[in-house]
Amino acid sequence: MTYNDNFIRACRKQEIDTLPVWYMRQAGRYDPDYRKIKEKYSLLEICAQPELAAEVSLMPVQKLGVDAAILYSDIMNPVASLGVKFDIVANVGPVIDNPIRSKEDVERLRPIDVEGDLGHVLETIRILDRELSVPLITFAGAPFTIASYLIEGRPSKSYIRTKEMMYGNPTVWFALMDKLGEMVITYLRAQIANGAKAIQLFDSWVGALRPADFEKYVLPTITKIFEGIADLPQPKIYFPGVASGELLPCLHHIKADVIGLDWRVSIHEGRQRLDNRFAVQGNLDPYVLTAPMSVIEEHAKQIIDEGLKKPGFIFNLGHGLFPEASLEKLRELTSYIHTYSRSCIAKS
């Protein structure tokens, strides 16, 4: 079995022969076979069965030909180990039984016990490490994004209670950030110890903050997380989520290797805002996938042409796949990215 390391090489800004591509939420509801599994099991039930979670993680590698697998899991999984009760509700998202609103609520959070409470996740990683011929990406949710669920009690568009705590009770806010930061470091280190070849920190909703508030209330914990895993050689990705282009200049000194970009900022502009310090990943608008294949390829070509101007580029979406996406179009897009980029690289 030949191992395809183009993704790892791109993360490290090394020479590649073909542009690597993977898609956020690539194991998901656009796949009819996955939908059949979801008729029997919930997301959390799939996660609890390592063989099944590994099977779902492998599906897009086998069906699409992507250059990396991502662990089938959920950013909320480690939160249960802290003593937080929640459910993933269809068409809603994470719903918390008792939202965190006070100092006492924060103090009740336990330290994470990865081996004891998340052994099924680690076993899934070990299975995938044995079976994959491409790198396995594992992940964690970043503290702001996790905190927004814990405080609001469910997904929010305004983040009013989250910002109320952040601005009005910073002592409690930073205590929560510290606990979540430690959770993330412990969880990511365990993932890597069990076979992860790269990690991604998802901060899906941090774009709701203005840069000054991000720097004051969130960036210290993000910095601490990447410092806490800096001794590990595996590539590290930070995805600051949607509408986060204005935050990019704040990231110059974090010890990550790759920054994920959403579709609102071009690859060229993203690199400039990051002072060309990182490899970059992105950034096709997922909903371009609703267009005819010729339009999808036109958008992809623009991104590839821009991305290949400098070393260190990974093709991805600007956010996650959506249920209505076409499996066949994704397969065709992946093939196009490989074929077109290979010809570009050969000419350079």
Image: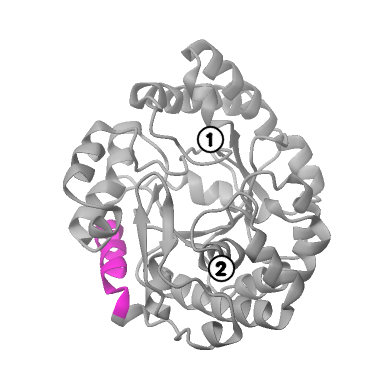
Question: Which residue is drawn at the image coordinates 72% and 34% (left, top)?
Answer: 266
Q: Quadrant of residue 165?
A: bottom right
Q: Earlier in the sequence, mark 1 or mark 2?
A: 1
Q: Amino acid at mark 2?
A: Ile
Question: What coloring was used for the rendering?
Answer: one colour
Question: On the image, numbered disc 2 is attached to which residue?
Answer: 151
Is residue 72 left or right of 22 when viewed as pictured?
left
- Residue 287's spot in the image, x, y percent? 53, 27
Q: Which quarter shows the C terminus? A: top right
Q: Quadrant of residue 94?
A: bottom left
Q: Amino acid at mark 1?
A: Leu
- Residue 154's spot in the image, x, y percent? 49, 58
Q: Which mark is residue 19?
A: 1
Q: Secondary structure at mark 1?
A: loop
**Residue span colored magenta:** 117-130
Q: Is residue 151 magenta?
A: no
Of residues 271 and 214, which is closer to you in this image?
A: 214
